Image (cartoon, grey):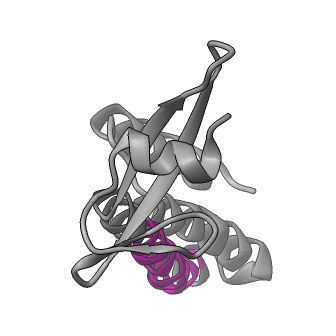
Amino acid sequence: MKRWFTIPTAAAIAICLAGCQNINKAQTGALGGALAGTAVGALAGHDAKGALIGAGVGTAGGYIVGNEMDKHDTNERIDQVSQDANTTVVNVHNSNGSVTPVALRRSGGNWIGPRGEVYANLPTEQQLRQVYGF
């Protein structure tokens, strides 16, 4: 590789990393794709033209892949928050001093217990002790 390739690449990396405190996968993919594309283009023997084309293609491809990964992560977080919002735990205090946590899931206007039992209202600890306590 020639000196013109390493100095601009190192400068670009330094600038990108210095300004990116909260970097996401789309940005990481774009940066990685740009670097890989630049290297492949330069190594293919087309010097500056190949490096620029490789950088452009790599940036676009890396961004697309990283962005899809970010979307997937966001959807998983949304699903988890939604699930958490529809779930509550009632602690059943047992006669021996232990505690049995009972997770209840809201479904429509009802609450569903771990064994599939349905309650019209959020059950009390006393109601759950009959099923889960001792």
- Work out whether 60 lies above or below 98: below
76 vs 61, nearest the viewer: 76
Q: Please state the horizontal and vertical placement of residue 21, each as a whole percent of the image.
A: 33, 35
Q: Is residue 70 left or right of residue 61?
A: left
The quadrant in which residue 42 appears is bottom right
Q: What residue appears at the point 77 percent right and 81 percent down from the top-left corner? A: 44
Q: What residue appears at the point 35 percent right and 40 percent down from the top-left corner? A: 15
- The quarter in which the C terminus is drawn is top right
Q: Is residue 67 magenta?
A: yes
129 vs 64, nearest the viewer: 129
Q: What residue appears at the point 45 percent right and 84 percent down from the top-left corner? A: 60
- Residue 22 shows up from this direction: yes
- The quarter in which the N terminus is drawn is bottom right
Q: Is residue 57 left or right of residue 1?
A: left
The quadrant in which residue 47 appears is bottom right
Q: Is residue 52 magenta?
A: yes
Q: What residue appears at the point 51 percent right and 34 percent down from the top-left corner? A: 92
What span is in magenta?
Answer: 51-76
- Work out whether 32 lies above or below 119: above
Predominant secondary structure, magenta span? helix
